[in-house]
């Protein structure tokens, strides 16, 4: 893990299937707070627990113009047949981007940060973020799904330069 708190590729934790969260403990609450702080600092759209070195099935998403949402033990129960290819990047692979085709809409079940069951219908960017983060929980990175012809390195932002 780098000093910014984000685990970078090719760290093994990014390739492992994460374990379910069995109960909400003070350690889980502290993890959620740490992940929220990282997501805000990086102005990111989503972060999964393996990206901070913790192999648990927990992610946080922050779609534009929507509140941050904590989701534990997520599973996609329905996907639209319509796929949309769009650019993705990842805090764990700074400055690399590529087009990934994902379902335009999904229905997701899981638990909220208080351990209560939730079911969400997500579309567009929110659906893309959730699918990207759930992939992290299964040891899959966006580079595994990206069209190889679309992968490119961008000039790193000052924050990304600190990460490399």
Image: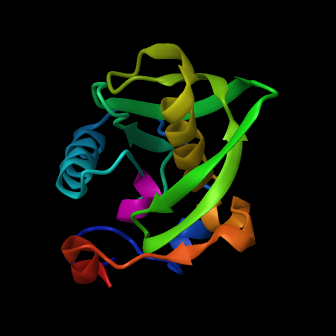
- Which sits in the foreground, 59 or 155? 155
Screen quadrant of the N terminus = bottom left
Residue 55, how many percent across, how many down? 49, 57
Residue 18 in sight: no
Q: Residue furthest right?
A: 81
Residue 118, how many percent across, how many down? 49, 15
* Magenta stretch bounds: 48-53
Left or right relative to 42: residue 70: right
Left or right relative to 62: residue 75: right
Q: Determine whether 102 is above or below 16 in the image.
A: above
Q: Determine whether 110 is above or below 12 in the image.
A: above
Residue 119 in sight: yes
Q: Residue at (27%, 25%) from the top-left corner?
A: 67
Prevailing secondary structure of the magenta residues? helix
Q: Residue at (30%, 42%) from the top-left corner?
A: 28
Q: Residue at (32%, 77%) from the top-left corner?
A: 156
Left or right relative to 145: residue 124: left
Q: Is residue 50 magenta?
A: yes
Left or right relative to 65: residue 117: right
Q: Is residue 106 magenta?
A: no
Q: Determine whether 1 is above or below 92 in the image.
A: below
Screen quadrant of the C terminus = bottom left
Residue 26, how many percent across, how many down? 22, 39
Residue 54, how many percent across, how many down? 41, 59
Q: Residue furthest bottom?
A: 164
């Amino acid at each position: 893990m780098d000093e910014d708190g984000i685990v970078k590729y090719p760290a093994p934790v990014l390739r492992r299937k994460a374990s379910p969260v069995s109960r909400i403990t003070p350690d889980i609450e502290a993890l959620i707070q740490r992940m929220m702080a990282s997501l805000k600092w990086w102005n990111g759209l989503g972060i999964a627990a393996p990206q901070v070195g913790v192999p648990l099935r927990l992610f946080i998403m922050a779609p534009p113009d929507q509140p941050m949402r904590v989701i534990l033990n997520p599973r996609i129960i329905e996907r639209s047949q319509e796929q949309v290819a769009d650019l993705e990047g990842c805090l764990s692979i700074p400055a690399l981007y590529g087009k990934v085709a994902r379902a335009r809409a999904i229905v997701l079940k899981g638990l909220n940060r208080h351990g209560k069951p939730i079911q969400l219908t997500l579309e567009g960017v929110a659906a893309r973020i959730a699918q990207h983060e759930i992939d992290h929980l299964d040891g899959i990175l966006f580079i595994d799904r990206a069209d190889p012809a679309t992968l490119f390195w961008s000039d790193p932002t000052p924050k990304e330069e600190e990460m490399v």
